[in-house]
Amino acid sequence: MRLSPFLCALLSIVTAACAAHTSNWAVLVSTSRFWFNYRHLANTLSLYRTVKRLGIPDSQILLLLPDDMACNPRNAFSGTVYSNADRRMDLYGENVEVDYRGYEVTVENFIRLLTDRWEEGVPASKRLQTDEGSNILIYMTGHGGSEFLKFQDSEEISSWDLADAFSQMREKKRYNEMLFMIDTCQANTMYRQFYAPGIIATGSSEEDESSYSHHADNDVGVAVIDRWTYYVLEFLETQVSGPTSDKTLGDLFDSYDVDKIHSNPGVRWDLFPGGEQAGRSRRVVDFFGNVQSVEIQGNRSDRELLRDDLEGLRRLVHEYEAFATTQESNATEMSDVLQRRTESASKKGSNQWTKETQNPVGRMKTSETTQWTRRVGGATVLSGLAALWYFAPKLV
Amino acid sequence: MEKLSAEPPTVVSASTSKQPPPEKPEAVSLRTKIVLSFWAVILFLGLPTWWQTTSIYRADLPLQDMLNWADGFNTPTAIPLHIWISSPHISCSDAERIVRDTQQALDDLNEYPTLHQRLHLVNSRPSGQADKKEKGPLRTSCGEDTSSPSLGDPALKVHLEPANEGFAFELDPVIAEAVVRVPRNAATNTSQQLAEHLYGLFREEQIAAALQTVSLASHSQHAQAFLRSQPYDRVTKIEKQVNRAYKSSPEFHLTFSLFTASGAPSSWDVQDALKEHISPLVQALSSTSKFDVTTQIQLYSSYSPAIKPIIKDGLEGTFLQQKDLTAFVNAAEWPLAPSIGYGPTINFILYVPAKDEIPLRIDGVEGTSWLIPQWGGIQILNPPLSPDAIHGVVSLPPHLTKDLLRQPFEAFASQLLSVLGVPQADQFGKVLPLQLRLDVYKRFSTFTLYLKAASSLGSLARLAQRLSNIPIPKHVAELVDDAIGNLTAARHAFLESRWDSALTHSEIAYSDSEKAFFDKSMVGQVYFPDEHKVAVYLPLLGPIGVPLLVGLLRELKRFATRMRGLRK
């Protein structure tokens, strides 16, 4: 472990394979609607609280919640979401930033989010703006089966879709390392098709195995959290004290207890460079926290040098400005001449101006006319067919 | 009972049932026509329609070309770095000899062809008037004319001056010019020394370019060999510097934020401070990227609650532990992602602690500012406490004056340069002029954008090859063509050492290739397992297909028997 940074540096000279880890992102997805799936939203919100506590800023957390349990009319404690029957911690709280809600949570949007293929104008807060130095945590929960996860009762995402999306991310150097976590029935099948390197995947249950809820809150009336998530959170909240914790992924995965979880959680290491050994030694906060290296600037010599530089720069800027003003005066002389030359045509010019301002409208019109020709064409074909249908028997 | 009732009718039917009347020949031919016309409709109308509506449009991409760009086969093997040498006071033949020898020595020193220094003897005097005024004995104009189009942009202008003492190499403190004092005798030694100085000046830049080539292009033996020949600590230091920098982008946002733990200070002379310290830099950098500057103030916003500062006996104030600095940013409450425009945001935070924590310092170091790579800089400001005019209570000043802001903004200016990846002023014992460093940044940025554009094209090509069910619209192919065109133009500009034009083309190529890769219509069809396809087609094709197939088979059978009958 001591050697690894040195090795990394050595390797990097030859291949630059060990890109520096410079930022952290989290994508937390619940995929099910309706009140009785309260626990899936609570799972996701609990993870949200944890990664936020460990330092990932809201701008780097993408939270996808397909339903709003806090404001559900069946919620006896309106405006709140709890993941424990003791109701000590309101997960919804004062400060929660849901990036995708309700019907925005779709398979298509999720894949667009991963591959960052959006139309223009989608705000930065809704996008996964990662680069080759980013570690990504992806957490998904919902109802699933063998190699698929259901989204919103109407569609499903398959293991192949996820694998292709991840490989596209890899291709575009959109992540450095990724931790994929999924809590659903037959969860371990979801990462079976992955093939992009650099991913550690873990799931709550084997194929043909259900994933169970942990406990219900009788006043809320439904189960409030799933077992696997509950024990993962228990580890994160009790063992990982803060952004500087030294706990490793190995510690996290060793904390899985089949007797408590009631299903067999799985981990996939083979895609990770260095395999299980390298993966186990990764710190938990490499994925759940926001790890930034920091350079303290103690010495002042730099700054003094810069002060001289700035003086010089100001001198340069002044020179440049003087140069620019002379240029400009030349240019204005030229433009004067030009203006005089074009003055005779000024009336025409004004006409042209109005025309130019109308130009965009004109362009709209041309597209409209093409639409009209299309419509006319369509109508002709339809009426021709109708005529054929009506007259053909009479002719025969 | 079933058996009983079932038996007799079959017997009866076998013996007494009437045969249907033989089909009329015209009925038979009509049926043949019907079957054939059904099949004709299916084959000539149905099949093409089905094919047309279910096939995915994939525009032709020049895949091999794109992969070649990404692999670095098209990257110019030699990118020259022009250095102009002028020698107004040295005889022409001497100057030419010095230039020739120095070039020879440079070529011997370094074989890596990217950013290799190429010396040009130029005629420094502006032609025309200057010539007439000066009437010295050595007014022979030698060297190339500076306005000639065959010369690229100079990375450095060197003036040779005759001197009586030894060799000296003096860089201008601001602009990219150097004066070299050449002793009148022992000229061969001069060339060697000059070559070493020039090589040393641009060595870091070459290392950075080689590192970038290795990380972005897959065909990079030259660069790897060059890196292996360089000292290890130097390479790692430059690598660190490159990693600290924001990724090159055509556009950046700078956000300066004042966060105070209490209600004061609530205003700052930020405009003056920006004008004083940041604007000159932004102006100088604007030839490389576009910069937007925003500022904000937020009161009662303390640092992250996870941090517990410590108090030391005998020392006033509080101390932050060094390991806590990474968690200092209160991401939950500090509005640091304005998400305006396209470019990445670089944050600069000025933090004023609460009165009872002042002075807030970092344990073990003198400074109170630190830099977060690829993010920005943070500075703690401990303003002087002054007694309140009315109550006499010691309190924080309500307003931060220009003088108080000088030191933090000087720090921000230096952090801005580091975060952008402009080389440090003082590096390996040399002090580099700012102009030269900004030029280095510009060249590095250009080269990086160029390599990134090429690498994006490669990613797109591999994606198109691997995922067969992803649609590729026509405009993506157009963008790809455009990017390749701009890359080619940039390559020509590199060869001629015209960095402005190379930067423009690289920027366009970069944004086009990014747009092509991230085109919104290229979201692959959701995966359909084969059993799903069967499940979709079977209910449709079963009821229609069975009668059609049986009909066709019957017709074929009849046709076969008729043929046999005819042969007999």
Image (cartoon, helix red, strand yellow):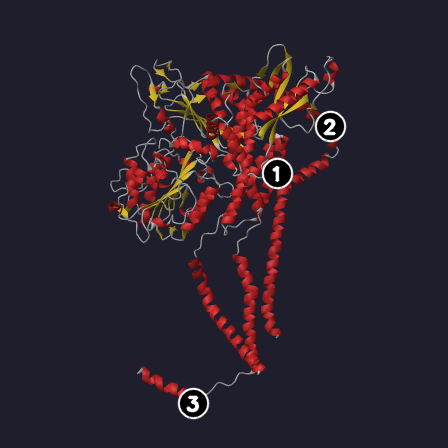
Query: Gap between marks 1 and 3, in whole Å?
Result: 91 Å
> In 3D space, how far apart are the residues under numbered discs 1 and 2 (Cα atoms)?
39 Å
Circle 1 residue: B488
Q: Residue drawn at (53%, 33%), measured in percent from left and top? A: B223
Residue sitting at the far top = B164
Q: Nearer the viewer, mark 1 or mark 3?
A: 1
Mark 2 belongs to which amino acid?
Answer: Val
In which quarter of the view is residue A380 placed?
bottom right
Q: Chain of mark 2?
A: A
| Residue A291 shows in this picture | no
Is the Cβ of the residue at disc 3 closer than 8 Å to that at disc 2? Answer: no
Above-or-below relation of B175 to B448: above
Residue B220 horizontal/vertical position (percent)? 53, 36
Amino acid type assigned to the residue bearing label 1 in the image: Thr
Please give left or right for residue B210 compared with residue A110 in the image. Answer: right
The residue drawn where x is 55% and y is 77% is B559
Residue B412 vs residue B393, the one in the foreground: B412
Disc on res. B170: none
The N terminus of chain B sits in image quarter: bottom left
Residue placed under numbered mark 3 in the picture? B16
Image location (x, y in percent) of residue B228: 49, 30
Spot occupied by residue B351 in the image (x, y as percentages of width and height): 40, 23
Dot 3: chain letter: B
Q: Amino acid at mark 3?
A: Thr
Q: Nearer the viewer, mark 3 or mark 2?
A: 3
How many C-alpha atoms fall within 10 Å of the one at disc 3: few (<14), some, or many (≥20)?
few
